[in-house]
């Protein structure tokens, strides 16, 4: 179940995710990641898709060749939730190479 972040939790998430941009109107976080080629970008998206299914929390995203843009927000709570915290941590771990799943 998604639980909307408090103002303090939201501020902490934004502070802890410097690679992400916060859209205060939508209460969403966005990150763009560039890869060496399309295969690397698609592999990244596939790993996120598998985690999104596990968490039942699906990102808004786009892919153009070697670039993937991911936007996270929880529509059920009209803003950022605990599920977005989990997804940002997972995606950041993928980018820095420390993800295990």
Image: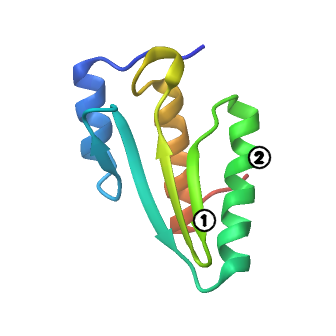
Q: Where is 42 relative to 21, above or below?
A: below
Q: Residues within 10 Å of mark 2 (few under 14, many from 20)?
A: few
Q: Where is 87 relative to 41, above or below?
A: above
Query: Residue shown at 56%/79% (left/top)?
Result: 35
State the scheme by which the image is colored. Answer: rainbow
The percent coordinates of residue 36 (x first, y second) are 59, 86
Label count reads: 2
The percent coordinates of residue 75 (x first, y second) are 51, 23
Would you name the residue on which mark 2 appears? 50
Left or right: residue 70 compared with residue 27: right
Please tell me whether mark 2 or mark 1 is closer to you in this view.
1
Label 1: element kind: strand
Q: CA distance from mark 2 to mark 1?
A: 17 Å
Label 2: element kind: helix
Q: Where is 11 relative to 17, above or below?
A: above
Query: Among all residues in the image, which is located at the extreme bottom?
Result: 36
Left or right: residue 88 compared with residue 23: right
The numbered dot on residue 63 is 1
Left or right: residue 90 compared with residue 5: right
- Quarter of the view holding residue 80: top left
Q: Nearer the viewer, residue 20 or 16?
A: 20
Query: Residue shown at 71%/68% (left/top)?
Result: 42
2 or 1: tag closer to the N-terminus: 2
Query: Residue shown at 60%/13% (left/top)?
Result: 1
The numbered dot on residue 91 is none
Query: Residue shown at 73%/78% (left/top)?
Result: 39
Q: Where is 9 relative to 89, above or below?
A: above
The percent coordinates of residue 64 (x first, y second) are 58, 72
Q: Residues within 10 Å of mark 1 (few under 14, many from 20)?
A: some
């Amino acid at each position: 179940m998604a639980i909307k972040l408090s103002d303090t939790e939201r501020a902490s998430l934004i502070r802890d995710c410097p690679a992400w941009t916060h859209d205060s109107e939508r209460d969403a976080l966005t990150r763009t990641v560039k890869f060496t080629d399309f295969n690397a970008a698609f592999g990244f998206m596939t790993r996120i898709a598998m985690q999104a299914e596990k968490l039942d929390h699906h990102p808004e995203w786009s892919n153009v060749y070697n670039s993937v843009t991911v936007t996270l927000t929880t529509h059920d709570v009209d803003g950022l939730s605990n599920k977005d915290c989990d997804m940002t941590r997972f995606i950041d771990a993928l980018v820095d190479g420390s993800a295990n799943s």
